[in-house]
Every structure is written in C-alpha cells, then in structure tokens.
Image (cartoon, rainbow, N blue to C red):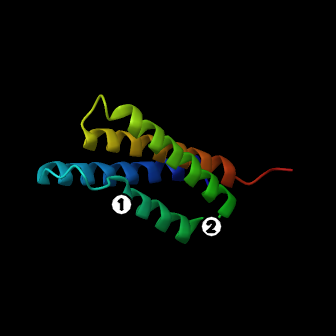
C-alpha cells in the first residue's frame, strides 16, 4: 500500500462525497446518509485490492470515531448536510492514513 494509492482513493472518495452532497442539496433532502456511498466505495476497494484485515479494522474504527465526533461538533455550526460531508471527508482522511500506515510492509 503506497501513499500515492491512498491519495488517489481520497480523491475518488471526495468526488463521490461531493456528488452525493450536490444531489441531496438539489433534492432538498438532508436526512439521507452522506457517508454510505463513500463507505461502499472504500469497502469495495478494500475487498478487491487490499485484504489486510488488521489494517482494515483499525482504519474502520478510527475513521468511524472521527466521523461520529465531528458530526456532533459541526452540526450546531453548519447545516446538517454540510456537517455530514465535512465529517465524512475527515473520517476518510484518517481511515486512509491509518490503513496506509498499518498495511505497509515492515522492513527487517
């Protein structure tokens, strides 16, 4: 797992998150989860390309924790949809960083 691949995955997740935000904002729907399509993208990428289970579990827990903490902190200051998008993006950054660090081969 390289940092370049993590960066490319972050770009794809950002594109998906932005597209979901745009569609939901156009529809005026603020109750649907923004993170669901991003999570599906990350899980599909993990399943096809990188089955490092320890790294995946650590990334999932750390990314989820960031999302849950930031959503509560951001919702009083932003509308629900924007808070969800920002928290999701931050969770993806943390999850990809943790996954990349944990999935890198160790040198002896």
Crowding around mark 2 (Cα neighbors within 10 Å: few <14, some 14 to 19, many 20+) is: few
> Mark 2 or mark 1: which is in front?
1
Q: Secondary structure at mark 2?
A: loop
User: Hey, which residue is sitting farthest top in the picture?
Assistant: 77
- State how far apart marks 2 and 1 are (Cα): 20 Å
Residue 9: where, in percent of width, then height? 46, 53
Q: Is residue 16 left or right of residue 66?
A: left
Q: Which mark is residue 37?
A: 1
**Total tally of numbered discs in the picture:** 2
Whole-percent x, y for residue 5 in the image: 52, 53
Residue furthest out toward the right: 108
Of 61 and 37, which appears nearest the observer?
61
Residue 30 or residue 11, whichever sits in front = 30
Residue 73: % across, % down: 40, 32
Secondary element under disc 1, as helix, strand or loop, is helix
Q: Is residue 63 rendered to the left or right of residue 41?
A: right
Q: Residue at coordinates 53% horizontally, 71% vertically from top-left?
A: 48
Q: Which residue is mark 2?
A: 51
**Residue name at image x 27 percent, y 41 percent:** 80
Q: Is residue 10 left or right of residue 2?
A: left
Tell me which numbered mark, 2 or 1, is placed earlier along the sequence: 1
- Who's the residue at 24% across and 49% down the image? 21
Q: Which residue appears farthest toward the bottom when viewing the image?
A: 48
Is 12 on the left or on the right of 30, as rendered?
A: right
Residue 9 is labelled as: none
The answer to whether mark 2 and mark 1 are in CB contact below 8 A is: no
Percent position of residue 51, x then y: 62, 67
Q: Residues within 10 Å of mark 1 (few under 14, many from 20)?
A: some
Along the line of sight, the residue nearer the viewer: 100 or 22: 22
Depicted 57 relative to depicted 88: above or below? below
Q: Quadrant of the N terminus?
A: bottom right
């Amino acid at each position: 797992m390289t940092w370049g691949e993590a960066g490319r995955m972050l770009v794809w997740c950002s594109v998906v998150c932005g597209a979901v935000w745009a569609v939901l904002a156009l529809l005026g729907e603020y109750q649907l989860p923004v993170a669901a399509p991003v999570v599906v993208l990350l899980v599909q990428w993990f399943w096809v390309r990188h089955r490092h289970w320890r790294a995946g579990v650590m990334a999932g827990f750390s990314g989820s924790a960031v999302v849950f903490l930031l959503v509560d902190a951001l919702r009083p200051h932003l509308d629900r949809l924007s808070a969800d998008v920002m928290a999701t993006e931050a969770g993806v950054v943390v999850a990809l960083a943790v996954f990349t660090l944990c999935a890198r081969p160790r040198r002896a």
